[in-house]
Amino acid sequence: MPKVRVLSFNTLVRGEPRVRLRALAEVLADSDYDVVCLQELWIPPNFGLLRSLTKAAFPYAAHGPRLPRITGGLLTLSRIPLVGHRYEVLAAPAPWRRDLVMRRGVLMTRFNDGGEFFTVTNTHLTPNRPADWSKAAPFTRVQQAELARLAKAVRRIQSGEPVIAVGDFNVPRDSWLFEGFAAASGLRDAFDGDAATTFRPVPGWDGAALDQVLVTPGVAAKAEVVLQDKVRMADGRERYLSDHYGVAATIG
């Protein structure tokens, strides 16, 4: 496995996203990340803006279909050449229109770094808005089903090459749901169980470790929580880049 730096970040679609995306593009250009996996880029103008601002630093990109919205809201940027990519829907058909349009799923991208190959999966699963991940909670069945489909998608890669799975899983790292996914996928938690929040705390909730990095067992990986501080925007204000923090890892 070549040594790579990977970032996963939920960009937050609400609250003046274009102002924050411009600031994010500057942060990414100055970073040492080789692969960047972004979520919540459903809206084509927002997607197009960020892609145009990152092309110089990250010449390679993968995403799903772009109409009527960016499928899954996922974008994977890279300084490393891509071999190919594919998108797979994980969310079951839902009666509410919003989720039908979002088509939440996983973006699987294969890379070639000087003759060494690996795959990165980028995902954003359905949020558990009550924040109740107990086994008795009705909504956990939805997330459990999505995680089972994601685990199957990871196992189907079957290339014998390293796999890095990242994204906003919307399940806590110290939950039974995440433990079940790790076991079913055969991947290892790069945080080694550290459950420091990746969601910026708000009054009444201290957040949870919802954003994840997992790797093929035997692959060296050291993960950390990043992008936690406010950033100065083009209008002079200092703001957080998102309601999430980023998760990054040095792998290989």
Image (cartoon, grey):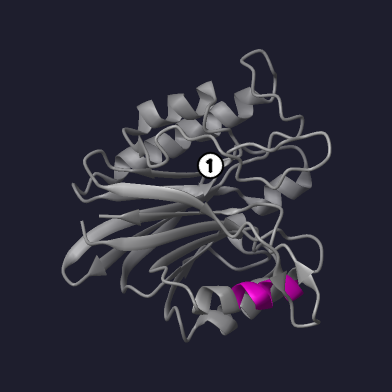
- Is residue 38 on the magenta stretch? no
In the figure, is residue 40 to the left or right of 167? Answer: right
In the figure, is residue 114 to the left or right of 164? Answer: left
- Magenta residues: mostly which secondary structure? helix
Within-10-Å neighbours for mark 1: few <14, some 14–19, many 20+: many
Query: In this orientation, does residue 195 appear?
Result: yes
* Residue 53 location, quadrant: bottom right
Q: What stretch is highlighted in magenta?
A: 18-25
* Residue 215 location, quadrant: top left
* Residue 214 location, quadrant: top left
Q: How many labels does the image show?
A: 1
Q: Position of residue 88 (x, y in %)?
A: 47, 49
- Is residue 23 on the magenta stretch? yes
Task: Name the residue rendered at 70%, 64% in the picture.
Answer: 230
Foreground pick, 218 / 151: 218
Q: Position of residue 31 (x, y in %)?
A: 47, 73
Q: Mark 1 points at which residue?
A: 90
Task: Name the residue rendered at 31%, 33% in the picture.
Answer: 186
Q: Where is residue 41 in the image (x, y as percent from the top left)?
A: 64, 63
- Judged from the image, the secondary structure of the residue bearing numbered disc 1 is loop
